[in-house]
Amino acid sequence: MSKLHRVRLKKLSTLLGPSPSALVLSSNPRAHRSHDQSYVYRANSNLFYLTGAVDEGQVLLITNKEARPTLFAPPPDKMRTVWEGVSPNPKLAAERIGANLVLTKNPVLEILPKLRGTRTLYFQNVPGSLSRLVADAVLDEEGHLFSNLPQTLVQLDTLMQELRLYKDPSEIKAIEAAAVVTNKALQAVMPLVRPGIKEWQIARTLEHNFNMEGGRQAFNTIVASGPGAATLHYDKCNRTLRSGELLLIDSGAEVNMYAADITRTVGVGEVTDPVLKEIHQIVLDAQLGAIQKVKHGVLIAKVYDAAAEVMAYGLKDLGILKGTVSKILKTKSYRPYFPHGIGHSLGIDVHDIGELRGNSAAMLKDGMVFTIEPGLYFSKKTGNIPACGVRIEDDILVTKTGRKNLSEGLPKDLNPTL
């Protein structure tokens, strides 16, 4: 992968432009859980993208004054090795990306002198990270010293989104692998979808299945039955499944740092209520219609509108909305029931960078991976519709001629046995 990372670094260096600029990017800090315990460590997404590094304590410095980047890493720590094992050799990481290596216990002090004469600093704004500490150190310098340091500080994502929005073949393969793991886990859990089972039992089984297939969860699993499914980011997972209700499962595995994001809504036992079947069909038709609009050069607004039109017709047929469909669409009176956008960019982060989420003016382009996830939600009994929520989601690669469903293979009907 060294060639791939060097290509990415070269592209990023070009984005720095001709004026004296620097970029500082570092590993994530450990996230505190309780007392002396931390959450399971996850590498910084941008640092992984550029270098393949998944280690703690590393800082990458790129300036347009120097031909090679510099990688700062902590020197060997014998005590840490006793407790945590041997850390990966930073020399190999530096060689992989063609960087100079500096071993130091205090990279901030090493980096500050290298920023003198630089006008713009791009930094990763992660609280507690070494990158953020460098930015803070620049701002803390007194007036006569600060004058020779960067005067403009910019969050790094403004540069990184230009690269990460467009997935290369290796990234597409990784997302597909995550989708395969997610689909397998969802299929394996479907026999649990029956009356009397707790939501948390399904969620924990899903996550166990991710681990058994070589992945881990990419985000907090949503398992929401009945009225809980009307809460978009439902996290209680404590309700008992009841016969004839709908169950919404929004989950995704992460494999080799890349995420899948798949949602299915299924019945708990046999769904006999015709209105629940109709709502599910409306959302499915909306999703299929939206997916058909995906191709290079299409505005996200057009994809969203395709789903919204199906929703408008459906809500009118259900008797929830009155008036003509054109008026419903113009006034957006469907929004209380379809309150979110049509999807988001997907990649190393489940909500990947790139300003596509909720941005209807953005254009889909070849190489982007975008979720399509319309939904209808009723937070309380509305007419003859019980409180419920339906969402169906897939991960779609945008191509020059159309699209490819990277999460294809998992049925979308109401049959929980698959």
Image: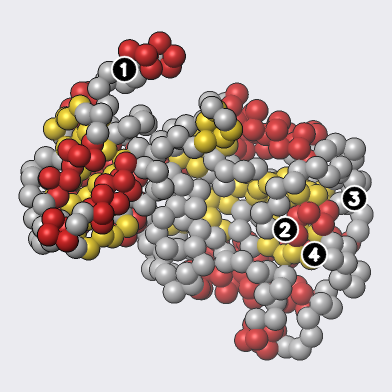
The mark that comes first in sequence, 1 or 3, is 1
Name the foreground residue: 220 vs 59. 59
The mark that comes first in sequence, 2 or 1, is 1
378 lies left or right of 176:
right
- Give the amino acid type for the residue marked by disc 4 in the picture: Ser
| Residue that carries the numbered disc 4 in the rendered image | 379
| Residue that carries the numbered disc 2 in the rendered image | 231
The answer to whether marks 1 and 3 mark residues whose Cβ atoms lie closer than 8 Å is no
| Residue that carries the numbered disc 3 in the rendered image | 244
The answer to whether marks 2 and 4 mark residues whose Cβ atoms lie closer than 8 Å is yes
Gap between marks 2 and 1 measured at Cα: 47 Å
- Residue 16 in percent (x, y) is at 18, 57
346 lies left or right of 60:
right
Gap between marks 1 and 3 measured at Cα: 58 Å
Q: Which mark is residue 77?
A: 1
- Residue 408 in percent (x, y) is at 57, 45
